[in-house]
Each structure stands twice: as C-alpha cells, then as structure tokens.
Amino acid sequence: MGVQVSVRPGRPPMAIPLRPLGDRGRRWRRWARAAGFVAVALLVASAALALLGGAYRATPFPAAAELRPPSGAAADPQRQAQRAWARLQGLAPRGAYIVVDTYRNKLRLYRDGALVRDALCSTGSGIVLRDPRNGRQWVFDTPMGERRIQRKVKNPIWAKPDWAFIEEGFVPPQSARERFDDFSLGDYGLYMGDGYIIHGTIFQTLLGQRVTHGCVRLGDADLELVYRTVPVGSRVYLY
C-alpha cells in the first residue's frame, strides 16, 4: 500500500511504497517525540520565569525563625481560645438590645447578652401596593440590618400616609386632621427611623404572621416590657 505524491507538473504521479516500521524505527520515533516534548517544556518554563522573575525576587523566602511553630504560652490552645472568646465578648452589644427574626416572627429582648423576653411579633407582608392615579408603589417589607431606637412615645398618634387610604380604596385627604389615628399603634411606640416603629396592635390574633406594612407589632404585655426596658439609643438587629 502506498501514497500518491506529485513531484513535477505535467508528469503522472509517482507511487512511493511505504515499508513497515521496524523495532529500531519505532524506538527512534519515541525518542524524537520525547525530545520534542522536553524542548517545548523548557521553552515554556524559561518564558514563565522571565515574566515572573520580578515577583519572585520581590517576595523573599521567610526566615527559618518565621517558620517555627509557636512555643510556650502562645502555643497553648486553651489560652488561644480564651483570647478569642474575650475578643468576641468585646464585640457584643452592651445593655439592652432587640433582635427581630422576620422569618419566624420572633422578637427577642436581651440585656448584656442574657435573654429577657422571647415574644411573638408581626412583620412586613412583602405586598406591593400601587397608586392607580400615578403608578407610585410601596413595598411593605420590614427593613433588614441594624437600627437604633431614636425615640419612645407613650400613646403614640399615627399620621396616616397616602398608602393607608389607597389600600382601603380612598383618595388621600388634603387635611392633616383627617390623617390622625390615635388607636392603631397601641399604648407605646419605639421609633427606628424612616417611619418604622415597634408598636402595639388591635389585631392581636395575627401576631406571629407577616401582615404589617413594615413595622414590628407586639402584644400588649410584651410591648410594655420592651418599652420600659429599652432606652433611647439601643440597638435593634433585624434579619
């Protein structure tokens, strides 16, 4: 069996017979391939060293003393754990603070890390309301993150925003007097800014559900305890 190779235009192709490759030929072919691979690898390695040589020179190998494991007190696992615990304790909030779990609808009141009250609450429904007049919309979510109690009010009065009327199918009134509501927020209000409040509710049976417009609702007894325990400036963690 052979291949056809054209050697000169105008002449018929000449058949060049191919002989079987003997053992010696096979050995030479393997050696040639290996030599080629080695040559390519050396070229690639030399190019990489030329490019990265500056980085290697800029990062000296650490001294032998730096590679030694810590000894004495520094190597004591118990002391290391105590130091780590002390650092964590230093980061913990002091005094009274509030943690709101919007997934389980739980409000937990702590004082210096100790749990004072574990209460059911209601949080934002996540509903989107749109104003049919101009397309403006509101999303009723409880905010996430860290906030502070900015002020506390007994017998709070709610100045109802536009969405409170649109939700009920009414046009928002022009008069401010028609917006005042002195019963929906309960006996106490703890204001966290941007209109978000921890307050009471006239819908006690809905505690534990996501039904609010973003505020955190509590039952009467839980709200009174939180109001009397948490001073202005206290932290509120919401997740």
Image (cartoon, rainbow, N blue to C red):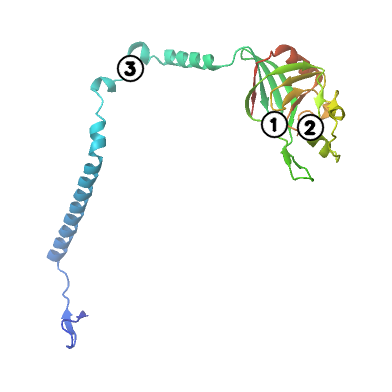
Q: Which residue is mark 3?
A: 70
Q: Which residue is mark 2?
A: 161
Residue 126's x, y, as percent? 72, 38
Element assignment for label 3: loop
Residue 231's x, y, as percent? 69, 13
Residue 202 visible in the displayed image: no
Q: Residue 142 bears which disc, if any?
A: 1
Marks 1 and 3 sit apart, C-alpha to C-alpha, by: 48 Å
Q: Mark 2 packing: few (<14 Cα in 10 Å), some, or many (20+)?
A: some
Q: Which quadrant of the rendered structure holds the C terminus?
A: top right
The answer to whether residue 88 is left or right of residue 56 is right
Q: Nearer the viewer, mark 2 or mark 1?
A: 2
Residue 204's x, y, as percent? 83, 26
Residue 227 visible in the displayed image: yes
Who comes first in sequence, dot 1 or dot 3? 3
Q: Residue 43 bears which disc, if any?
A: none
Who comes first in sequence, dot 2 or dot 1? 1
Who comes first in sequence, dot 3 or dot 2? 3
The answer to whether residue 15 is left or right of residue 114 is left
Please tell me which residue lies in front, 144 or 138: 138
